Image: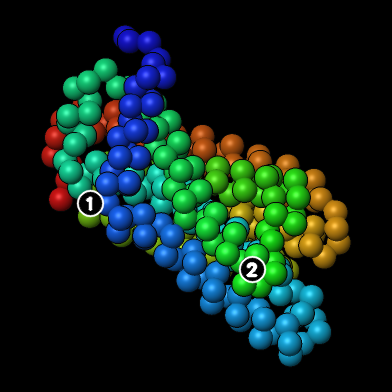
Amino acid sequence: MSRFSPARVNAMLLRYVYLLTASWPRTLDLIYWPLVQMILWGFTSRFLMSNSSYVARAGGVLLGAVLLWDVLVRSQLGVSVSFLEELWSRNLGQLFISPLRPYEWVLSLIAMSVVRVAIGVVPAVLLAIPLYHYSLFALGLPLIAFFTLLVAMGWGIGLVLGALLLRHGLGAESLAWAAVFVLAPVSAVYYPVASLPHWLQYVAWSLPSAHVFEGMRTVMFEQRFAWDHFVAAGALDLVYLGIGAAAFLYAFGLARRRGSLMAQGE
């Protein structure tokens, strides 16, 4: 059994970077939706700020929530789309006649997810400053915590979706694009968890994202960092990542034993 090789992880990361930079539509797709959402919600917030004293206080919360929500979306898609690139090109068989180990591939998918998040979200965050005089960086150090927790949740979801794609092939491709949005209503992105029906609140508290957005509102409204939400979200992220990694590696091993890696593709 070959030893862990950082060079192989780096080689896979470079492969995904080259795929991304060689196609301007791929890069544009990363930037397009965050900018559209930032502009749409930014102007919506501005309108509401001029018509309600309460919403004037909450305007920055709405815009901040939009930008942080896109961190989660881009993180999950960063893992899923890089994985789909291999299915679309029928490249799994070629990858794994090399010494590449499955967990090294997982690490390269995670690293590429960070690259995609940075490309997709940072331009929107920066453009919000001159357009709306709102800076997400005003959250200070809690922003690092929120960013990390949401990115980690996206990795966990992306790995579970990768397992489903290994098991069901491109027939499950639509899940890669839609799965994270199913969680939006119970993630308390734009409203507190208390607004949900009582029974649905239990579902919300099982998601790291709900704790992150409750923590964000605590910082913005009460000027304090909610350690309880931070710890809960971190613990849940570990569970999500553990489940995601286990499911992915199990599905990969099953596909390899069945000889279906070569059959994956369009």
Name the residue beneath numbered marker 2: 130
Q: Nearer the viewer, residue 76 or 263?
A: 76
Q: Nearer the viewer, residue 22 or 261?
A: 22
Question: Which part of the image, by quadrant, shows the N terminus?
Answer: top left
Question: Is 93 drawn above or below residue 224 in the view shown?
Answer: above
Residue 18 percent across, percent down from the top left: 30, 40
Question: Is 248 drawn above or below residue 203 in the view shown?
Answer: above
Tell me how many marks there are: 2
Between discs 1 and 2, the one toward the N terminus: 2
Specify whether 46 is left or right of 8. Answer: right
Residue 250 percent across, percent down from the top left: 35, 32
Q: Nearer the viewer, residue 51 or 217?
A: 51
Specify whether 74 is left or right of 214. Answer: left
Amino acid tagged 2? Pro
Task: Classify 10 Å Cα crowding around label 2: few (below 14), some (14-19), many (20 and above).
Answer: few
Residue 263 percent across, percent down from the top left: 13, 39
Mark seen at residue 170: 1
Specify whether 65 is left or right of 94. Answer: right
